[in-house]
Amino acid sequence: GDVRLWGGRFADGPSEALALLSASVHFDWRLAPYDIAGSRAHARVLHKAGLLTAEELDRMIAGLDRLEADVADGSFTGTVADEDVHTALERGLLERLGAELGGKLRAGRSRNDQVATLFRMYLRDHGRIIGGLIADLQDALVGLAETHHDVAMPGRTHLQHAQPVLFAHHVLAHVQSLSRDAERLRQWDTRTAVSPYGSGALAGSSLGLDPEQVAADLGFERGSVGNSIDGTASRDFVAEFAFVTAMIGINLSRIAEEIIIWNTKEFSFVTLHDAFSTGSSIMPQKKNPDIAELARGKSGRLIGNLTGLLATLKALPLAYNRDLQEDKEPVFDSCDTLEVLLPAFTGMMATLTVNRERMEELAPAGFSLATDIAEWLVKQGVPFRVAHEVAGECVKVCEGEGIELDQLTDDQFAKISEHLTPEVRTVLNVRGALASRSGRGGTAPSAVATQLTELKADLVIQ
Ligand code: ARG
């Protein structure tokens, strides 16, 4: 029979072309459990408003329970003819309860307020799942920092040797950005904990239903929306979710890029575990960092999901427009992408081997201790402008002779500047350079230990 929800004023059914264009059931079916939860809550407020008897409510809930079980085991599914998940589940309910009772549930609600509510519920659940996966990655990175807490490496700016840093310091920098991503998810969740159910198509309902009870029933801690037009028409919660997930992708891609570089023959900073790398079909010697490359690639996809969604939302007049049906696939894809990517990425990071010797060897290379000469001179009372010149001169001499800074002789130092006494050698080593940067947030072992403690405390809360 005709499953359309608006049959009354139409003489003809939809053309096949329209039905195919209109259908969303193939992607919004994943909202089914949330739709059924919404229906239970709605049935209760219909009863509270005197529109369902206690006995009708019981039968309604039992019917919804049966429908839920049939959805869960796959014996009931939506079809293109149903158009969307909401319509399909209404058909399922009518089939189970008959038209008399089944037909009562639609009173006072619209697919517009339904979908806005269910979408929030779905994304809130997946926001929590993604938050948990980020915490797993942070744990792996914290573990990597802890087990290599004393390893020095070349810190870089512009990808050039800049100053030596602790490897742990570098790794924890990534943990910090992931902490902000996790915080963004939590703050987004708080903003999204408001239910549009009861907004109807756009104007609310004349039936005396209680949106606040529905909100509480569905786990919306901050109650129901204050404006039914906004409740049905706004999707900034989706855009923000798409941004946060894109930002996570971008942060992963930055770690990924480093892994790819570190894993090259030239760098040889890390070796990936066999279980988290791939081979080549033609070159037998190859061991490729595909997880990192896929992370880098998928970040593009996550950015695309955000920009596509923003383009859909731009200039939409209030209230609901069918364009909004395009809001779901991008962020469903963002959830799916991160839920597959993050566990693989965490596995890669948790199992890689660090080549300490190689990192330590390169830490002082590229004159990365030149700043230490300048800062040592400042401590001797030399203005920094002069100190910078003098240290630069040291580098120039070294480059000319093909030597490192600590290979300059006392005479060479004295010739460059009267301030460069042999005591300058005390800072011309990586350990000294690291230890001297002991202020908050610095790369000294003591400061990095504080950072580690703070992050671990954060991770417990998160
Ligand atoms: N399937 C639609 C969506 O995802 C919800 C239904 C609203 N349809 C409508 N014609 N008012 O946005």
Image: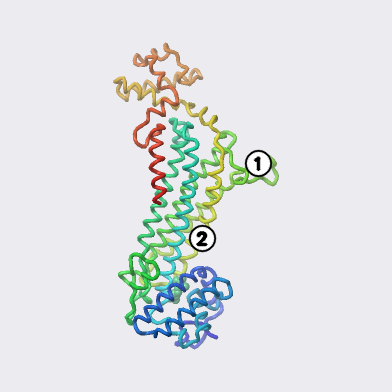
The answer to which of marks 1 and 2 sits earlier in the sequence is 1
What is the x, y in percent for residue 36? 47, 74
Protein image colouring: rainbow
What is the x, y in percent for residue 37? 45, 72
Query: Would residue 317 be visible to someone looking at this image?
Result: no
Q: Amino acid at mark 1?
A: Lys
Residue placed most toward the observer, 249 or 437: 437
Residue placed most toward the observer, 101 or 116: 101
How far apart marks 1 and 2 lie (CA) works out to 31 Å
Q: Quadrant of residue 172?
A: top left
Image quarter where ligand 1 lies: bottom left
Q: Is residue 240 above or below residue 99?
A: above
What is the x, y in percent for residue 33? 49, 70
Q: Quadrant of residue 314?
A: bottom left
Secondary structure at badge 1 equals: loop
Which image quarter is the N terminus in?
Answer: bottom right
- Relative placement, left or right, of 171 versus 271 is left
User: Residue at image x 68%, y 39%?
Assistant: 285
Q: Quadrant of residue 188?
A: bottom left
Q: Amino acid at mark 2?
A: Asp
Badge 2 crowding class, 10 Å Cα cut-off, few under 14, some 14 to 19, many 20 or more, is some
User: Residue at image x 36%, y 56%?
Assistant: 187
Dot 1 and dot 2 residues touching (CB under 8 Å): no
What is the x, y in percent for residue 20? 55, 74
Number of marks in the image? 2
User: Residue at image x 47%, y 65%?
Assistant: 328
Badge 1 crowding class, 10 Å Cα cut-off, few under 14, some 14 to 19, many 20 or more, is few
> In this figure, which residue is indicated by the disc labeled 2?
333
Task: State the mark number for residue 286.
Answer: 1
Secondary structure at badge 2 equals: helix
Q: Is residue 41 above or below residue 311?
A: below
